Image (spheres, rainbow, N blue to C red):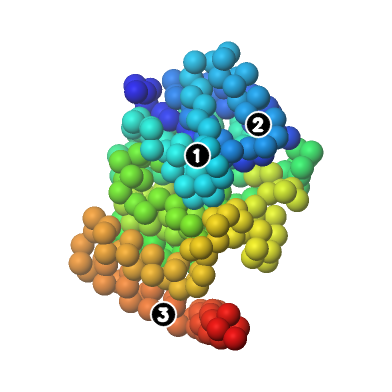
């Protein structure tokens, strides 16, 4: 059982190309008191060999290998569940971090008990590590009101980088975590905004790598996204409706006042109406698919 104040979880599947570079960047952190859980989703490349080699050299690494590919959502859980630390962060296998990222996020989070998450400024890099552009997440949510934070989060969230911030583990454990639907990561960060403020480290310490094999490379490729979240694809229907439903569930379980919940639900009803075309298309596609299978 980990006694370190920070745990890191890396879910990975066939990530050999960038894995060593990313592992080196994590193990070189100036804040070194962490436990590093790697959950390998039954990779078929050299991922296992690389992870076992690094784990043999560094006792902070705990390597877990799934017997089969359980999908991204469950694999994220596999490297979160064993963590017992006060703080937790997920680490992508292809996104290197600068040496002070954990230290700076830790200092900011520990100094502000009303913060639930801290993150560093981002940059976008290509498959070779070259800088494409600096990116502004604009999600330093400092509002005292949970409903104001939530609404601002929904309205301003674009690229999903805050998943890789440093998060208080206890509030994170109370959320839905990640589920097998394609906007689950967006829902999770929005849910966390109900639990506390988000703080931004004003340094570019996180690199988001854009490359053709990344799950988020082409968000219009619905089949690729479904393969990523749930290879069985049994749960991946009515994705927009699932997201709306999960937002309402998150609001119901959040430790906030009835007034705040009412404000959020009122906004969600408007938000659902604004997405009526997408939601209607999903119903139409479901009916067409059902009729096609019946015939």
For mark 3, does the 10 Å Cα neighbourhood hold few (<14), some (14 to 19), or many (20 or more) residues?
Answer: few
The quadrant in which the N terminus is found is top left
| Residue 163 in sight | no
Q: Which residue is at 32% across, 65% downward?
A: 249
* Mark 1 → mark 2, Cα distance in angstroms: 18 Å
| Residue 33 in sight | yes
For mark 1, does the 10 Å Cα neighbourhood hold few (<14), some (14 to 19), or many (20 or more) residues?
Answer: many
Q: Nearer the viewer, mark 1 or mark 2?
A: 2
The quadrant in which the C terminus is found is bottom right
* Mark 3 → mark 2, Cα distance in angstroms: 45 Å
Q: How many marks?
A: 3
Towards the viewer: 81 or 93: 81
22 over 188 or under it: above or below: above
41 over 225 or under it: above or below: above
Query: What percent of the width, then of the height, locates residue 191?
Result: 38, 57
Q: Which mark is residue 241?
A: none
For the residue labelled by badge 1, is the local secondary structure a helix, a strand or a loop?
strand
Q: Nearer the viewer, mark 3 or mark 1?
A: 1
Q: Which residue is at 34% across, 68% downward?
A: 248
Check disc 3 and report the residue beneath it: 270
Q: Which residue is at 64% across, 65% downward?
A: 222
Q: Earlier in the sequence, mark 3 or mark 2?
A: 2
Check disc 2 and report the residue beneath it: 47
Towards the viewer: 234 or 154: 234
Check disc 1 and report the residue beneath it: 90
Answer with left or right where residue 221 lies relative to residue 163: right
Towards the viewer: 179 or 85: 179
């Amino acid at each position: 059982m980990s006694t370190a104040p920070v745990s890191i979880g890396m879910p990975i599947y066939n990530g050999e190309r960038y894995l060593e570079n990313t592992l080196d960047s994590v193990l070189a952190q100036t804040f070194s008191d962490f436990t590093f859980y790697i959950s390998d989703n039954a990779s078929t490349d050299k991922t296992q060999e690389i992870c076992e080699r690094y784990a043999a050299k560094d006792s902070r690494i705990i390597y877990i290998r799934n017997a089969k590919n359980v999908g991204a959502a469950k694999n994220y859980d596999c490297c979160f569940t064993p963590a017992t630390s006060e703080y937790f962060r997920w680490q992508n296998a292809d996104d290197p971090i600068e040496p002070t990222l954990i230290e700076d996020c830790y200092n900011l989070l520990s100094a502000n008990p009303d913060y639930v998450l801290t993150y560093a400024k981002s940059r976008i890099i290509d498959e070779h590590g070259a800088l494409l552009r600096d990116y502004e997440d604009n999600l330093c949510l400092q509002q005292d009101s949970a409903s104001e934070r939530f609404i601002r989060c929904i309205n301003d969230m674009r690229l999903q980088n805050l998943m890789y911030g440093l998060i208080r583990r206890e509030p994170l454990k109370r959320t839905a975590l990640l589920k097998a639907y394609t906007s689950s990561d967006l829902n999770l960060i929005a849910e966390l905004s109900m639990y506390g403020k988000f703080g931004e480290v004003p340094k570019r310490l996180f690199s988001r790598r854009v490359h053709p094999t990344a799950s988020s490379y082409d968000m219009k490729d619905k089949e690729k996204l479904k393969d990523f979240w749930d290879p069985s694809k049994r749960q991946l229907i009515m994705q927009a409706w699932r997201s709306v439903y999960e937002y309402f569930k998150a609001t119901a379980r959040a430790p906030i006042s009835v007034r705040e919940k009412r404000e959020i639900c009122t906004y969600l009803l408007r938000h659902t109406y604004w997405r009526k075309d997408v939601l209607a298309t999903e119903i139409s596609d479901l009916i067409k698919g059902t009729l096609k299978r019946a015939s």
